[in-house]
Image: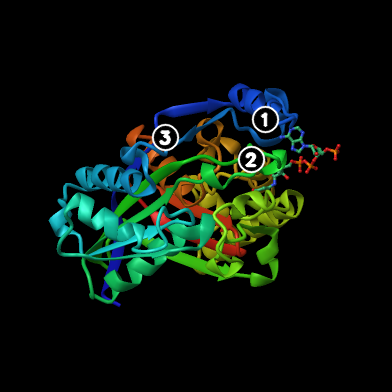
């Protein structure tokens, strides 16, 4: 291989509406579902999240994705015309077809690109980076936009207090470009896997045409069209697999955990991040976190927390980052990056 891939720009976009734990507690109390700011903070670390205004076209999944993409292009010093490929990772598209990626292509004017969505749930951004980088490394394309974008709150089951408190809406993007393989700054290594045996631990039962001509299928029960989650099992699996992947991918590159400057994990629960950091013996200060302010935004967590740290100047040239994700499926993805 004579080419490698480098992340040259990042961007993010959030809906305006902040929903604090207090707001959520009041909303759930109206449904006779009990929770509290204290419980949510203590058990998850989340303080607030954002919800899109579904009547505002600027806050649709595709629009958030396009805004994040434009910000990433600006940082990379590129225009939409330079983009060869757009991959949007999402599990909450507003249309079954076309893909969100095609809307992004239209909205930013990336007329020279081809576009598609992928669904690997919360691991989607890492899956997208790996996929796009294969086209770059084999010289099929030079520049790609990889986006993780979600408007998840319409899929929440307000009667399930263990899951509805966790998720929020956001989009994050990265521009990735071809560099010579001996470039210092590049994607160093990656690891992907999935395990469909755990599919039922986290799923959204579809409201299918096969269910019959029923406009009110969401009212048949609270599960149809809404997130169904086995939180306790996911917690255990997540800690185990995030730890194992971190060791696997650093080992593949001949590095050790001590060589990492930043752990960039999927943002699901502060206690998961702490347990992984403890097992890996990484100081918690090296773990990037934004879930306190945005909750779990699925495929958008890694690109948004990355973008935040890049713009704050915390991530510096030459540093080594480990992206580490898990999600429904289960899907797992880790990537080692030299910035
Ligand atoms: C969901 C999760 C926050 C629950 O936290 P937990 O500490 O495991 O809590 P448990 O499920 O053991 O429940 C403990 C008690 O808290 C209650 N509880 C659950 N949600 C609550 C809420 N929002 N407010 C108040 N009490 C709540 C439970 O009903 C249970 O009560 P009980 O003991 O009377 O039965 C946690 O398991 C988690 O984050 N799991 C991973 C989920 C995830 O990451 N999903 C996305 C994957 S990409």
Circle 1 is placed at which residue position? 28
Please, is residue 14 above or below residue 229 in the view?
A: above
In the rendering, at what x and y percent does residue 231 appear?
72, 49
Q: CA distance from mark 2 to mark 1?
A: 10 Å
Neighbourhood count class around disc 3 (C-alpha, 10 Å): few under 14, some 14–19, many 20 upward: some
Task: Evaluate if marks 2 and 1 touch, with contact meaning CB atoms under 8 Å apart.
Answer: yes
Residue at (63, 40) in percent of width and height: 164
Residue at (75, 29) in percent of width and height: 34
Task: Give the colour scheme shown.
Answer: rainbow
Point out the tag, 3 or 2, that comes first from the N-terminus: 3
Point out the tag, 2 or 1, that comes first from the N-terminus: 1
Circle 2 is placed at which residue position? 164
Circle 3 is placed at which residue position? 53
In the rendering, at what x and y percent does residue 273 appear?
62, 43
Please, is residue 30 above or below residue 160 in the view?
A: above
Say which element carries label 2.
Answer: helix
Image quadrant assignment for residue 127: bottom left
Please, is residue 234 above or below residue 190 in the view?
A: above
Q: CA distance from mark 3 to mark 2?
A: 17 Å
Q: Is mark 1 within 8 Å of ligand 1?
A: yes
Residue at (22, 70) in percent of width and height: 141
Say which element carries label 1.
Answer: helix
Q: Please tell me which residue lies in front, 322 or 134.
A: 134
Q: Is mark 2 within 8 Å of ligand 1?
A: yes
Residue at (46, 45) in percent of width and height: 151
Question: Nearer the observer, disc 2 or disc 1?
Answer: 1
Please, is residue 227 above or below residue 144 in the view?
A: above
Task: Evaluate if marks 3 and 2 touch, with contact meaning CB atoms under 8 Å apart.
Answer: no
């Amino acid at each position: 291989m004579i080419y490698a891939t480098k992340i040259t720009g990042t961007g993010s976009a959030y809906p305006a509406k902040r929903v604090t734990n207090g707001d959520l507690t009041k909303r759930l109390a109206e449904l006779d579902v009990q929770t509290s700011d204290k419980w949510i903070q203590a058990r998850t670390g989340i303080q607030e999240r954002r919800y899109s205004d579904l009547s505002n076209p600027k806050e649709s999944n595709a629009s958030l994705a396009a805004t994040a993409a434009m910000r990433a292009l600006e940082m990379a010093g590129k225009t939409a015309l330079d983009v060869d490929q757009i991959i949007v990772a999402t599990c909450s598209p507003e249309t079954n077809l076309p893909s969100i990626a095609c809307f992004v292509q239209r909205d930013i004017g990336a007329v020279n690109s081809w576009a598609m969505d992928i669904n690997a749930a919360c691991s989607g951004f890492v899956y997208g980076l790996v996929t796009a980088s294969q086209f770059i490394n084999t010289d099929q394309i030079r520049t790609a936009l990889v986006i993780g974008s979600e408007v998840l709150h319409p899929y929440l089951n307000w009667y399930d207090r263990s899951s509805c408190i966790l998720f929020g809406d956001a989009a994050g993007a990265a521009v990735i470009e071809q560099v010579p393989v001996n470039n210092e700054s590049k994607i160093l290594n990656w690891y992907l896997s999935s395990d469909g045996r755990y599919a039922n631990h986290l799923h959204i039962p579809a409201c299918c045409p096969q269910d019959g001509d029923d406009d009110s299928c969401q009212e048949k029960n609270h599960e149809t069209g809404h997130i169904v989650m086995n939180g306790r099992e996911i917690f255990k699996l997540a800690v185990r697999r995030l730890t194992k992947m971190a060791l696997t991918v650093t080992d593949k590159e001949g590095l050790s955990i001590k060589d990492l400057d930043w752990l960039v994990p999927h943002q699901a629960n502060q206690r998961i991040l702490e347990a992984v950091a403890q097992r890996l013996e990484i100081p918690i200060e090296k773990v990037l976190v934004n879930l306190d302010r945005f909750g779990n935004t699925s495929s958008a967590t890694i690109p948004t927390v990355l973008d935040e740290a890049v713009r704050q100047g915390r991530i510096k040239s030459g540093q080594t980052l480990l992206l580490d994700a898990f999600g429904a499926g289960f899907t797992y993805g880790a990537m080692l990056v030299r910035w």
